[in-house]
Amino acid sequence: MAGTVVVGLDIGGTSTRAAALTLDGERLGTGRAGGGNPTSHGADRAATELLTALRGALTGLDPTRVRAGAIGLAGAGRLLADPAGRDAFDRAWHDAGLRCPYTVHGDALVAYASGTPAPEGTVLIAGTGAIAAEVRDLRLDRVADGHGWLLGDAGSGFWLGREAVRRLLADLDSGRAPGTLGRQVLTDLLGTPDVAPRPRNTVDTVIQAVTRRPPVDLARLAPRVVDAAVAGEPAASALIAEAAGHLTESVSRIRPAGATGPLVLGGGLLTGDTPLAAAVRAEASRRWPDAPLRSAGDGAAAAAWLAARELPEVDDPTALHTRLVPPSA
């Protein structure tokens, strides 16, 4: 077993991470590259980032030792249905010197596997977007939300940013002076917290500042909401509570009351020490008191585990998970 190597990749919109590990858990190499999501960046650029990350992870390692690999990325189904995109990934895999097969999984499954080896459970991810998914036999089953910024992603980073702007506009319409969060949003959007003598002028300027940029850019305001909530700002705290309600409601669409399988929390808003993570954990504990709550961890290592568990010499996938995937909370 010590000679067998597996490779895993966690591909996101802003970064690509790769890891090469032995079945004994020794990390032989890691690699990192830019965003490699083919939906966001196109297949050719995504394949280039994939190759860069692979080469980093395989530095000083004979790639023919690698017996299996797995890739986790958002929109995995779209890649698998796109012959040109799959060909680009195949070429990158081959150019890295790899001759073993690889599998492609959705990022939600990889996030789940980074938190637990349990074959059945639930994963909730909240970052720029938001999605909840049921896992059965380590395959994604039913999914809730993940509908994108226009139709859903309730409780996500985009949602928090948009709602912060909407509340600012409501204050200005009503003639109320913006609070701490509103002034911070004004500063981020306009460069100043000052409101014009005629508040409607500021409203119009805010609208223009938002609509000139891609809608998803509103997610960059989410950290402002989080920081203001930490400081006890009432409007921000109310937004956090509302976001937590949306996220746990998404989970409840696919997870029965009283379910005892693990619930894995992933995405930047739920894996850090944030008020939203605390609020979601509290609400999840209330709804599913007997379910273990886990944080998503090393996605590249989890992808490697998903690849390795199919090898004939692996007879205890749970023990293998302990060796390959660093523990999370």
Image (spheres, helix red, strand yellow):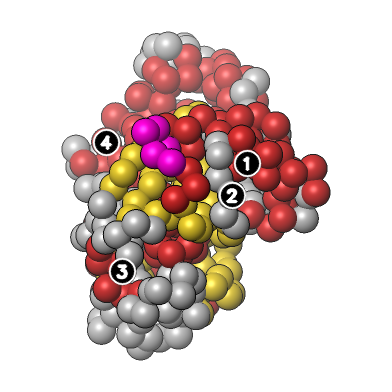
- In what element is the residue under mark 2? loop
Residue on which disc 3 sits: 320
Q: Label 4: which residue?
A: 227
Mark 3–mark 1 distance (CA, rounded to whole Å): 27 Å
Q: Nearer the viewer, residue 284 or 194?
A: 284
Mark 2 or mark 4, earlier in chain: 2
The answer to whether 186 is drawn above or below residue 99 in the figure is above
Mark 3 neighbour class, 10 Å CA radius: few under 14, some 14 to 19, many 20 or more: some
Whether 91 is drawn above or below 207: the answer is below
Left/right placement of residue 316 relative to residue 58 reads left
Determine crowd level at label 1: few under 14, some 14-19, many 20+ residues with C-alpha closer than 10 A. Answer: some
* Mark 1 touches mark 2? (CB < 8 Å): yes
Q: Earlier in the sequence, mark 3 or mark 2?
A: 2
Q: Amino acid at mark 3?
A: Leu
Side of 191 relative to 207 (left or right): left
Asked if the residue at tag 1 contacts the one at tag 4, i.e. Cβ–Cβ closer than 8 Å, the answer is no
For disc 2, the marked residue is: 99
Sequence order check, earlier mark of 3 and 4:
4
